[in-house]
Amino acid sequence: MLSKNQLGFLYMFLSVCAFSAMDLIVKWSENYPVGEVLFFRGLCGIIPLFFFIPKERYFDFYKTSRFLLHLKRCVAGLIAIVAIFIALRKLPLATVVSITFAAPIFTTILSIFLLNEKVGLYRWLAVIVGFIGILVISEPGFNSLNLYYVYPIIFCLGLSYVAIAIKQLSSSEPVWLISFYFSISIMFLSFFTIPQGWLLPSVKDLILLSLLGILGGLANLWLTQSYKLSDVSLVTPLKYLALVFAIFFGYIIWDEIPTLKTLIGSSLVIISSIIIFRREIFYKKQVSISRHE
């Protein structure tokens, strides 16, 4: 029988694996319109949620008294997920994953304005170190006017507000309801892209696209379960396995070899987010939630 910490460790590992596999499918699906891929993420992402809804809530599970905050969370989440989908298709996998680790940096800044939090010297230094890391990673892109490097940063900005909104929502809303509204909003957005021309997927592609949505839904639920069951200090460092997976699969599948600047920059970003994470633990605050998309 596993302890709560061991279960939390397992759930975090499963979440990282699911997000990494989802990233692979998004990058692979570049021949399909982004809107069509979003549709499968939204539709199939709902499937795992129904296994978590209590039986007594089956007929009114969608009810909420905080619709406006759900709406804000969904808008920020949609901006983030569209940005990350575009980035994964246009940039090396390891580069995108490296920049996404900068989300806690932007969350720290937004928390000053949205939550009236006070940020001390250590976290400000961490923010500066993180921004230097982003510049080191993206500098070649800016020099050659490759604006696709902006998309992972947009993702971080959107995800930062998502983390803050989820902190506020989780005080009264179950996780599955937060995820449900987001999945519905993804589906709703995808319908506006139909005039751009969707493609009829083959049976194999249909399975992979559906799997993308299921993995996304499961990853979010596993992540939240991990934080509920175990010490965040134990499980949070596991999320950096995503960079190892990105480097490995990027090389195996797409012959992508991360540059020295990418490795140096990602190291600075990771160090920055670890400092922020440790300071949040020190002040006994809820750690900024990782990817929720």
Image (cartoon, rainbow, N blue to C red):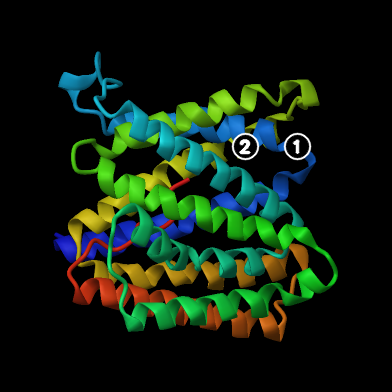
- Picture layout, residue 175 above or below residue 148: above
* Residue farthest right in this picture: 144
Residue 209, label in figure = 2
For the residue pair 92 and 116, the one nearer the viewer reads as 116
**Sequence-earlier tag: 2 or 1:** 1
Q: Please state the horizontal and vertical placement of residue 200, each as a whole percent of the image.
A: 76, 25
In the image, what residue type sits under mark 2?
A: Leu
In-front residue for pair 127/84: 127
Pointer 1 residue: 32
Residue 197 seen from this side: no
Q: Position of residue 132 (x, y in %)?
A: 58, 80
- Secondary structure of the residue carrying tag 1 is loop
Quarter of the figure with the N terminus = bottom left
Q: Is residue 262 above or below residue 157?
A: below
**Which residue type carries mark 1?**
Tyr
Give the secondary structure at mark 2: helix
Instruction: Assess whether mark 1 and mark 2 are in contact (beta carbons under 8 angstroms).
Output: yes
Camera-side residue of 18 and 166? 166
Q: Position of residue 230 (x, y in %)?
A: 20, 63
Task: Give how far across and how far down residue 139 sits, in percent.
Answer: 73, 76
Q: Residue furthest top?
A: 59
Q: How far, Cα to Cα, is label 2 from label 1?
A: 10 Å
Residue at position x 62%, y 39% in the image: 208
Q: Does 262 sit left or right of 102 as displayed? A: right
The image quarter in which residue 125 lies:
bottom left
Name which residue lies at 54% across and 39% down. 78
Label 2 vs label 1, nearer the camera: 1
User: Residue 124 vs residue 243: left or right?
Assistant: left
